[in-house]
Image (spheres, helix red, strand yellow):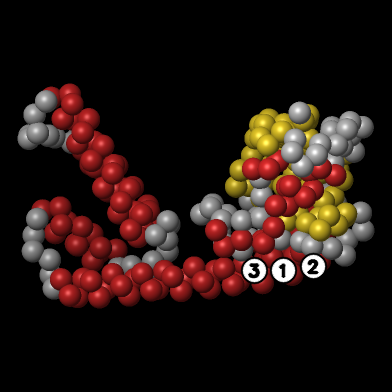
Amino acid sequence: MNLKKIMALTSCSLIGLTATAYSDTNTPSGIKVGSQASYTIGYQIGSGIANQNFGIDNAKAAEGFEDAIKGNKPKLSEDQIQKNMQELKNTLIKKQVDIAKQNKSNSEKLISEISKIDGITKVDDGVYYQMIKKGNGKKPNADSKVTIAYDGTTPAVVYAKDSQKAIKAIKDGKLIGSSFDSSEGVSFPLTNLIQCWKDAIPQIPTGSTVILYCAPDTAYGTRAPAAIGPNQALSFKITLKSFS
């Protein structure tokens, strides 16, 4: 989430609180927010900034926040503020570019290693699966609506920290990496899914459990959700329950 989104969400939260108070009292003035709610607003703003790892001066950030809340004149000129915001924006953009490059490098190395492991099936370039339990049901087709249980992880993060340990775990049929999404049972059309799922799931018999490995360009690429990050290889432990 970038700085503009943080500020936009904060503004929306404040507007929502104000709207609620207005609808209850039918008076636009004299709205009082309790101490806990006030603390929550400040904490949420701080959390949003902290999660971005800006490396800011906390005391100065708090000082600026307090000046704005109290309606004090800013200690910097408008030109200085605009310049600082642009510099921060440029820093964030560069950070995202650097992260995307590093993720891509780690992911490419991981997928290359996975392609050499015995017992892992290549579906297409950058798409591989490991059969954990083979079912005896029929296979879906490209237009099927599938019902599955799954857990999705980012394995390249683990691989970058300890490649040998990661590859050993993969050979042992273990799903590695932090989970970013999971479900005990969900249904959706294959046509709506990322490319690696479209390619691999029609090759899997119903009742099977597999671990699917997806190179970044077969998953979300540079447009991944924030919980995943740009250019991440993904792995999914998938159980195909049924299809229609």
Where is mark 3, residue-wise? Answer: 104
Q: Is residue 129 left or right of residue 64?
A: right
Label 3 and label 1: CA atoms lie apart by 6 Å
Where is mark 2, residue-wise? Answer: 112
Q: Name which quarter of the figure residue 141 lies in.
A: top right
Indicate which disc, 3 or 2, sits on the residue closer to the N terminus. Answer: 3
Label 3 and label 2: CA atoms lie apart by 12 Å
Residue type highlighted by circle 1: Glu
Q: Residue at x 59, y 72 (%)?
A: 101
Q: Is residue 55 left or right of residue 118?
A: left
Residue 175 visible, this orientation: no
Q: Which mark is residue 108?
A: 1
SS at mark 2 in the image: helix
Work out whether residue 220 or residue 232 is closer to the camera in this orientation and state it: 220
SS at mark 3 in the image: helix
Using the image, determine if residue 243 lies above or below residue 162.
above
Residue 202 visible, this orientation: yes
Cβ–Cβ under 8 Å for marks 3 and 1? yes
Work out whether residue 152 or residue 47 is closer to the camera in this orientation and state it: 152
Label 1 and label 2: CA atoms lie apart by 6 Å
Q: Quadrant of the N terminus?
A: bottom left
Work out whether residue 51 or residue 237 is closer to the camera in this orientation and state it: 237
Q: Extreme front residue here?
A: 143
Q: Residue at x 24, y 42 (%)?
A: 14
Cβ–Cβ under 8 Å for marks 3 and 2? no
